Amino acid sequence: MNAYAIHVTADPAPDLSQAVEIFSAAWNAAPGLWLVRTSLNAAQVRDAVKTHLGPEDRLLVLGVSGEAAWRGFSEEASQRLREML
């Protein structure tokens, strides 16, 4: 299973909740930032999400390796981050 961070640059950030339903797990970590787990590769994740974006929106899909650091998240959110990695 692969973990990816999906970042969308748009104002306002689009609601990708329908787009991410196809993934094994998905979490909207912050506005415009989703973490997903899936057996798809990065290009397939991009292709699945891009149909939900506007023509001027920018999309970045990055593989997540399991090593991460963060600050300012609640304990519940921190636990969710650990689970997604």
Image: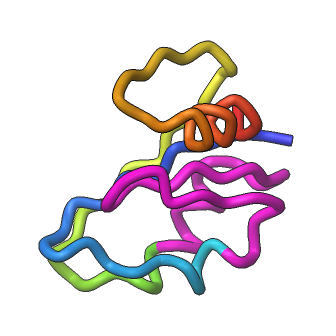
Q: Which quadrant does the N terminus fall into?
A: top right
- Give the answer, above or below, for where 30 lies relative to 53: above
Q: Which quadrant does the C terminus fall into?
A: top right
Left or right, 65 with respect to 15, comes to right
Q: Residue furthest front?
A: 75
Instruction: Tell whether position 70 is magenta.
Output: no
Q: Residue at x 22, y 60 (%)?
A: 9
Which percent across, then down, holds residue 66?
Answer: 68, 20
Which percent across, then down, holds residue 16?
Answer: 48, 77
- Give the answer, above or below, for where 41 lies relative to 71: below
- Give the answer, above or below, for where 44 lies relative to 3: below
Which percent across, then down, holds residue 59?
Answer: 34, 59
Q: Quadrant of residue 48?
A: bottom right
Q: How many marks?
A: 0
Instruction: Tell whether position 40 is magenta.
Output: yes
Q: Residue at x 66, y 60 (%)?
A: 26
Instruction: Between residue 11 and residue 47, name the one nearer to us.
Output: 11
Q: Residue at x 46, y 84 (%)?
A: 51
- Give the answer, above or below, for where 41 lies relative to 79: below
Span of residues in magenta: 21-49
Instruction: Between residue 66 and residue 42, name the one nearer to us.
Output: 66
